[in-house]
Amino acid sequence: MIACLVASLALGVLPASAASTSRFEAISCDLPYIADVALQLRCGVVRVPRDHGHPDGPTYALAVVIVRSEHQPALPDVKSL
Protein backbone atom coordinates (compact mmCIF):
# COMPACT_ATOMS: atom_id res chain seq x y z
CA MET A 1 0.00 0.00 0.00
CA ILE A 2 1.38 3.38 -0.95
CA ALA A 3 1.31 5.91 1.84
CA CYS A 4 -1.25 8.59 1.14
CA LEU A 5 -2.84 11.64 2.60
CA VAL A 6 -6.59 11.92 2.38
CA ALA A 7 -8.25 15.19 3.35
CA SER A 8 -11.84 16.24 3.33
CA LEU A 9 -13.48 19.51 4.26
CA ALA A 10 -15.06 18.75 7.58
CA LEU A 11 -15.45 20.88 10.64
CA GLY A 12 -16.59 24.31 9.51
CA VAL A 13 -15.26 27.83 9.78
CA LEU A 14 -13.55 29.45 12.76
CA PRO A 15 -12.08 32.92 13.22
CA ALA A 16 -8.30 32.93 12.83
CA SER A 17 -7.84 34.04 16.44
CA ALA A 18 -9.37 30.73 17.55
CA ALA A 19 -7.45 28.64 15.05
CA SER A 20 -3.96 27.32 15.44
CA THR A 21 -1.34 27.71 12.76
CA SER A 22 -1.43 25.19 9.91
CA ARG A 23 -0.23 22.28 12.01
CA PHE A 24 -1.49 18.74 12.25
CA GLU A 25 -3.58 18.24 15.41
CA ALA A 26 -3.90 14.52 16.19
CA ILE A 27 -7.34 13.15 17.11
CA SER A 28 -8.65 9.61 17.56
CA CYS A 29 -9.53 7.68 14.40
CA ASP A 30 -13.25 7.15 14.82
CA LEU A 31 -13.82 5.52 11.42
CA PRO A 32 -15.83 2.43 10.50
CA TYR A 33 -14.19 -0.76 9.23
CA ILE A 34 -10.60 0.08 10.16
CA ALA A 35 -9.70 -2.85 12.43
CA ASP A 36 -7.36 -4.37 9.83
CA VAL A 37 -5.43 -1.13 9.25
CA ALA A 38 -5.92 0.80 12.51
CA LEU A 39 -2.22 0.66 13.42
CA GLN A 40 -1.30 2.23 10.07
CA LEU A 41 -3.66 5.20 10.47
CA ARG A 42 -3.03 8.60 11.99
CA CYS A 43 -6.05 10.90 12.12
CA GLY A 44 -6.19 14.60 12.79
CA VAL A 45 -7.21 18.10 11.77
CA VAL A 46 -5.33 20.82 9.89
CA ARG A 47 -6.67 24.38 9.92
CA VAL A 48 -6.07 26.44 6.78
CA PRO A 49 -7.16 29.95 5.74
CA ARG A 50 -10.40 30.22 3.74
CA ASP A 51 -8.69 32.88 1.65
CA HIS A 52 -4.90 32.73 1.41
CA GLY A 53 -4.98 36.41 0.41
CA HIS A 54 -6.32 37.11 3.92
CA PRO A 55 -4.47 34.63 6.17
CA ASP A 56 -5.76 36.33 9.34
CA GLY A 57 -9.38 35.71 8.34
CA PRO A 58 -11.63 32.71 8.96
CA THR A 59 -10.27 29.20 8.48
CA TYR A 60 -11.43 25.79 7.34
CA ALA A 61 -10.74 22.75 9.51
CA LEU A 62 -9.70 19.85 7.28
CA ALA A 63 -10.08 16.31 8.57
CA VAL A 64 -6.96 14.33 7.61
CA VAL A 65 -6.14 10.63 7.62
CA ILE A 66 -2.52 9.60 7.06
CA VAL A 67 -2.02 5.99 6.00
CA ARG A 68 1.48 4.66 6.67
CA SER A 69 3.04 2.44 4.03
CA GLU A 70 3.15 -1.31 4.62
CA HIS A 71 6.61 -1.27 3.02
CA GLN A 72 9.38 -0.27 5.41
CA PRO A 73 11.20 1.79 4.56
CA ALA A 74 8.34 3.38 2.63
CA LEU A 75 8.54 3.34 -1.14
CA PRO A 76 9.13 6.74 -2.79
CA ASP A 77 6.09 8.74 -3.88
CA VAL A 78 5.05 8.39 -7.50
CA LYS A 79 5.75 11.58 -9.46
CA SER A 80 3.25 12.65 -12.09
CA LEU A 81 4.36 13.96 -15.46
Image: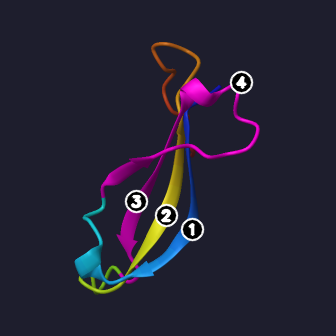
> In terms of sequence position, does the residue under pointer 1 or pointer 4 come before the other?
1
**Residue 66 pos. (x, y %):** 52, 40
**Residue 4 pos. (x, y %):** 56, 39
Residue ranking furthest to the right: 33
Q: How is the image coloured?
A: rainbow
Q: Is residue 54 left or right of residue 47?
A: left
Crowding at mark 3 (Cα within 10 Å: few <14, some 14-19, many 20+): many
In the image, which residues are magenta?
A: 23-51
Q: Is residue 25 left or right of residue 71?
A: left
On screen, residue 51 above or below 75: below
**Could you say whether the residue bearing mark 3 is in a helix, strand or loop?**
strand
The alpha-carbon separation of the residues under discs 4 and 2 comes to 24 Å
Residue 54 tag number: none
Q: Identify residue for label 1.
A: 10
> In terms of sequence position, does the residue under pointer 4 or pointer 2 come before the other?
4
The alpha-carbon separation of the residues under discs 2 and 3 comes to 5 Å
**Could you say whether the residue bearing mark 4 is in a helix, strand or loop?**
loop
Q: Identify residue for label 3.
A: 46
> In terms of sequence position, does the residue under pointer 1 or pointer 2 come before the other?
1
Q: Residue at x 52, y 58 (%)?
A: 63
Q: Identify residue for label 2.
A: 62
Amino acid identity at mark 2: Leu
CB under 8 Å between discs 1 and 2: yes
Q: How many marks?
A: 4
Amino acid identity at mark 4: Asp
Find out whether residue 30 is within the magenta segment: yes
The alpha-carbon separation of the residues under discs 1 and 2 comes to 5 Å
Amino acid identity at mark 3: Val
Location of residue 18 by image quarter: bottom left
**Could you say whether the residue bearing mark 1 is in a helix, strand or loop?**
strand
Amino acid identity at mark 1: Ala
Q: Identify residue for label 4.
A: 36
